[in-house]
Image (cartoon, rainbow, N blue to C red):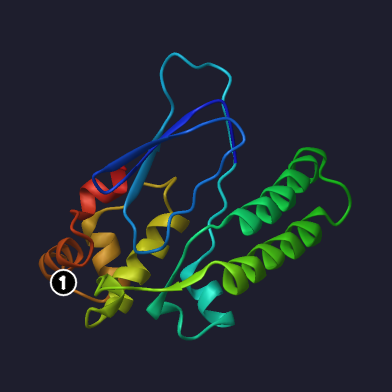
Amino acid sequence: MVRGELDAKFGKRSVCIKNGDMYLANSDELHETSTPEYIDNNYHIVILLSYDFIKSFYKKIDDYKFVLNGRAKDELSQIIRGMIPVVEDKPTFYQLSLNIDIIKICKILLTDCLVKKDNVSFSNMPNVGYAKKAISYIEENYKNEITLDDISSYIGLTPTYFSNYFKKATNCTFMYFCRG
């Protein structure tokens, strides 16, 4: 959810997300966002749903992606707008309220936005678990410096093998991915 403007890049495709709009990036989509320099008053809400969390609801998720449609977008927007005062005011048991909203978001995504993938993507590669585990680790530890040695040790691969694997799986180097 955006107030102001947000530039988003999905691979080679760039879009400008305007006030009140939302976008969805699937787990196997490399993406980055930035705010135009001339805008001072931007407000962005980012909700990261972990691959393992979604997979706990639907085991065949690797064969699908999420695509927003009008009705789902309206429902998601309403839920997210309702989350804003909860996050800002932090009433008693606010984490419970947010967890309920996250479950509602998952239900909408899984029931209304699930589309079969057309072609082979990194989710169909052998040992895709390494890439997904690495991306989850990066998302959970993005505030800390993550070295190639740290993540390859966490994944259980040599740094050289992990670096080559990650580049092949994501079409992006590990270092570039961490900076994005």
Name the outermost residue toward the right.
92
Tell me where residue 96 appears, x and y as whole percent. Answer: 79, 62
Identify the amino acid type marked 1: Thr
Q: Position of residue 150 (x, y in %)?
A: 28, 61
- Residue at the far bottom: name it: 59
Tell me the element at label 1. loop
The spot of residue 118 in percent (x, y) is 31, 73
User: Residue 157 at x, y = what percent?
Assistant: 20, 75
Residue indicated by mark 1: 158
Q: Nearer the viewer, residue 33 or 15?
A: 15
Q: Which residue is drawn at the image coordinates 18% and 58% (left, top)?
A: 171
- The image shows residue 7, relative to residue 125, as above or below, that is above
- For image coordinates 39% across by 78% down, the residue present is 62
81 vs 149: above or below: above
Q: Quadrant of residue 148?
A: bottom left
In the image, taking residue 10 as reference, residue 171 lies left or right, namely left
Give the image quarter of residue 3.
Answer: top right
Residue lying at 67% horizontally and 48% vertically, measured from the top left: 77
Residue 126 appears in which quarter of the rendering?
A: bottom left
For residue 145, side relative to residue 69 (left or right)? left
Residue pictured at 26% horizontal, 53% vertical: 147
Quarter of the image with the C terminus in it: top left
Label 1 packing within 10 angstroms: few (<14), some (14-19), many (20+):
few
* Image position of 169 (left or right of 72): left
Foreground of the two, 144 or 118: 118
Residue 35, compared with residue 45, is above or below; it is above
Q: Is residue 180 above or below residue 27?
A: above
